[in-house]
Image (spheres, helix red, strand yellow):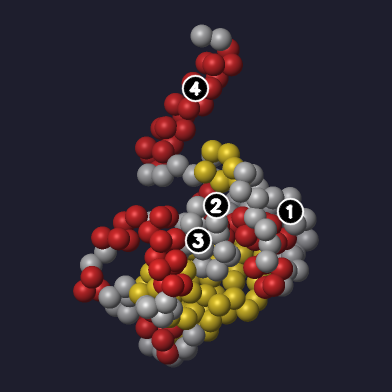
């Protein structure tokens, strides 16, 4: 076996071990240039699996309530930039949103494994907070069908969650974006720039 083939074999073996230890193998496009704020933001949202969803808690007198939630913004390599969630009112997050729609959603690059040994707070380890309104999506709409497909493709376990828990599709209607992906403070980025960015779907295995 030649040197190159041996290297490929060892790389494949390492990836298989990573898959077995983490439960999933991530296939993501290369991280965009930090100067391209829209590309960085969409890359971060589309290729992550979970984040912290913050709502206004009526039970806590209007204090913010943060909750770790799974999400998806579309089918693999077809992200829309809009986060969809599968929530139940047995959990405070959905109950809060039905009373007060104001919400924010924060995602970090760190879970993707592309930050190396850098601390999650290091500015070069990207993070984004999307602020807006957390809305219940009409159950009979085509958007719900799209969102379910997007969510279940990224989180297959959701298909088997108890029916009597009445999980429903919610989405975040984005009004403001806070992105840090390099030194120098947050990058200016409008919602329109974010949503209309054309993603590069050429990927590599991480």
* Crowd rating for badge 3 (residues with CA inside 10 Å; few <14, some 14–19, many 20+): many
Q: Is residue 204 left or right of residue 19?
A: right
According to the picture, the residue beneath numbered tag 2 turns out to be 77
Residue 38, quarter of the rendered image: bottom right
Camera-side residue: 74 or 107?
Answer: 74
Q: Nearer the viewer, mark 3 or mark 4?
A: 3
The numbered mark, 3 or 4, whose residue comes first in the sequence reads 4
Query: In the picture, which quadrant includes the C terminus?
Result: top right
According to the picture, the residue beneath numbered tag 1 turns out to be 34
* Crowd rating for badge 1 (residues with CA inside 10 Å; few <14, some 14–19, many 20+): some
Whether residue 114 is visible, yes or no, is no
Residue 169, quarter of the rendered image: bottom left
According to the picture, the residue beneath numbered tag 3 turns out to be 74
Camera-side residue: 32 or 62?
Answer: 32
Q: Residues under labels 1 and 3: Cα distance? A: 23 Å
Q: Secondary structure at mark 3?
A: loop
Q: Residues under labels 3 and 2: Cα distance? A: 8 Å
According to the picture, the residue beneath numbered tag 4 turns out to be 10
């Amino acid at each position: 076996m030649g040197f190159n083939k041996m290297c490929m074999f060892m790389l494949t073996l390492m990836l298989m071990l990573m898959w077995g230890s983490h439960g999933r193998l991530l296939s993501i496009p290369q991280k965009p240039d930090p100067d391209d704020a829209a590309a960085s933001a969409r890359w971060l949202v589309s290729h992550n699996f979970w984040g912290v969803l913050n709502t206004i808690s009526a039970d806590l007198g209007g204090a913010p309530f943060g909750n770790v939630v799974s999400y998806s913004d579309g089918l693999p390599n077809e992200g829309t930039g809009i986060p969809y969630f599968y929530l139940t009112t047995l959990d405070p997050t959905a109950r809060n949103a039905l009373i007060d729609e104001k919400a924010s959603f924060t995602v970090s690059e760190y879970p993707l494994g592309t930050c190396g040994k850098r601390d999650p707070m290091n500015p070069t380890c990207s993070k984004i907070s999307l602020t807006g309104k957390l809305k219940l999506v009409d159950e009979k709409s085509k958007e719900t069908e799209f969102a379910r497909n997007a969510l279940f493709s990224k989180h297959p376990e959701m298909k088997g969650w108890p029916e009597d828990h009445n999980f429903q599709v919610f989405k975040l209607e984005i009004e403001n974006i806070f992105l840090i992906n390099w030194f120098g403070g947050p990058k200016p980025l409008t919602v329109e720039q974010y949503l209309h960015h054309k993603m590069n779907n050429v990927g590599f295995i991480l």
